[in-house]
Image (tube, coloured by chain):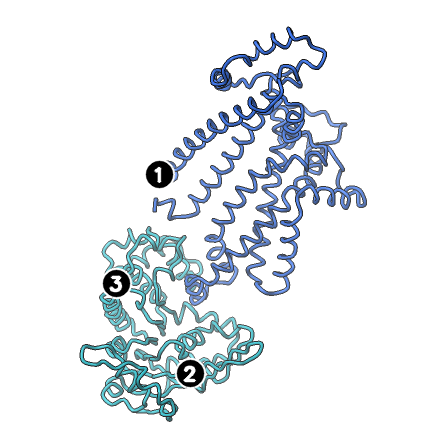
Amino acid sequence: MEHVFDLLIRRIWLSLLVLVGVSVLIFLIARVIPGDPARIALGPNATDEQVFKLRGELHLDEPIWKQYGYFARDLVHGDLGTSLYTNRPVVEDIIQFLPATLELVIAAGILMVLIGLPLGIISAKYEGRFLDNLIRVIALLGVSAPSFVWAVILMLLFAFFLPLFPIAGRIDTDYDIVRTTGFLLIDTLLMGNLEAFTNALWHLFLPAFALALSGIGQAARLTRANMTETYRKPYIEMADSYGFPKWRIARKYAFKPSLIPSLTIIGLDFAAMLGNAFLVEAIFAWPGLSRYGVAVILRKDLNAIIGTVLIISAAFLIANLVVDLLIAILNPRIRHGR
Amino acid sequence: MKNLTLEIIRLSLTFEGLMETNQVLHEISLNIAPKEKVALVGESGSGKSVTARLILGLLQSRAKTKIQGAIRFEGQEFGWITEKERDQLRGTRMSMIFQDPVSALNPVYNIETQFHEVLRRKYPLITRRQVRKEAIKILEDVHIVHPERVLKSFPFQLSGGMNQRVMIAMGLINKPTLLIADEPGTALDVTVQDQTLHLMQEMVAKRETSVFLISHNLGVVREFSDRLYVIYQGRIVEEGKTEDVFADPRHPYTKALLAAVPGITSGNTIADVINDTSAFRAPKEVH
């Protein structure tokens, strides 16, 4: 297991390096785009003196490498500056909006694993039969339509025509939630309010499912492809020739080696969902970070843009790190450093 | 003719495709007595491996596969027992070792886990400790010096020869009455292949296991088997005691096969004789 530990340390260093790179890049891009942030922040009625004063406060009149220096110094202290749009520290904004997005994306990720992988296994086990073809059609549908299309369709079907699920929001307004973590599912549990918990879960299901659908399709297709390939390997024939039970062969012998590439894709999908979440968040009126991100981009709120991108990059890197770690644990060749 | 380990009577196998049917085996008959080492010799595509898989009962439940004739294992006729009873025989009363041990062992489990799976076939409630004990015992039998270390290893961490030994040990740990060896060690180099044969010989002699050896390699067959069958295009064309067949091959295909053995003196290849195909259809020769 020490290889896994070494791997972890190495990957954490690399991730930090990537994060620094991202911060430089996004900082440069934010400064290079035309338009004066100070002017935008103050509005059209501000005088030139006011704008000049704010430029000075924001260090906008200094060379760009110096500006990055200020930015990096503040970043280390956990300060991402003030949002020109909400007039609050960006960190506070992020803390407010991030949990909603994470809750959505994590739920979608769980759905992806819990639905996508079993569909792939079933498909591979009944290769060429009816069930397989059915699952492949469903998976293809999931992959080929973008998540916002699914969001609208699901909302129409299961919230409007058939009012099984709530149309929008994270929870009904008549619950008073004490905010501790920002994750409604956790906060309601901490309050011991099971009814609110169920209500939040109910609100979460449709958007998470819409977001997860393409990932579910991809995971199912990839798992199926890998498993059918694994089924042709000599060690499967060997297991069969020793008469191991069929379901055991499927689960232990065919699935585990096939899981490795599936996990890689799930990890990437998971990270990509952080970005894709925006449209789903918009459709379901989900007060998350992706919506915040788009709002601040449209208003050219530079500090907030930089903060949002950094947070999403960090989440991306963490998701990849977790997947790499899981793969290392699953694959003895990596675990034993070969 | 009593108590044969394996008896195959006029076994035919046909794969039915969409447009055409392909008969792979034509009424082959063969038998293996207890403790006997019997070889089935032929070129690739002659139906050797398919025969092995039929004996194991691996093809019977496949769609579009027509099987005629009878397979009797220790007096139990496959046609009479249920599928479940037949599956029960696999891995317990008969087992198989494969051509390439490195790819036939599962890459993501260590050797001990794989022994556990095999032993569980015969003793469903076996504990890890018992598995270790049994596995170490049999690994010592196949002359592995550090069995504990091997048990903790994964196949890719062991050499081809080591994997081959592990595979033989796995094949024999449940004390089957029949061991099927499909081109054992062909994927390995010649010296390891030779070791493999000697090891198998030693192991089955001790355990009184019958062996059904499938090979295209006449050197291997001559050294290993008591009796042999020559199979050509799904038909058994010659059978007899190994030394008899080698001393006096009668069927033209057998002669061609023997002449094709690469040697310093012989420059023949099988292509020289294959032009005369009519002779290859000659009736079966029995010594």
Residue at x 68% of width, y 29% of height: A287
Quick one: label 2, few (<14), some, or many (20+) residues within 10 Å? many
**Residue at image mark 3:** B141
Question: How far is the residue under mark 3 from the one under mark 1?
Answer: 33 Å
**Residue depicted at 64% across the width and 6% down the height:** A49
Q: Quadrant of residue B138?
A: bottom left
Residue at 64% over, 33% down: A185
The amino acid type, in three-letter code, at marker 1 is Glu
Name the residue nearer the viewer: A257 or B143. A257
Q: Colour of chain B?
A: cyan
Residue at mark 2: chain:
B
The colour assigned to chain A within the rendered structure: blue
Answer left or right for A128 relative to A3. Answer: right
Numbered label attached to residue B234: 2
- Residue identified by numbered label 1: A2
Left or right: where B91 falls relative to A245 = left
Query: Dot 3: within a 10 Å radius of its alpha carbon, few (fewer than 14), some, or many (20 or more) residues?
Result: some
| Three-letter residue code for mark 3 | Asp
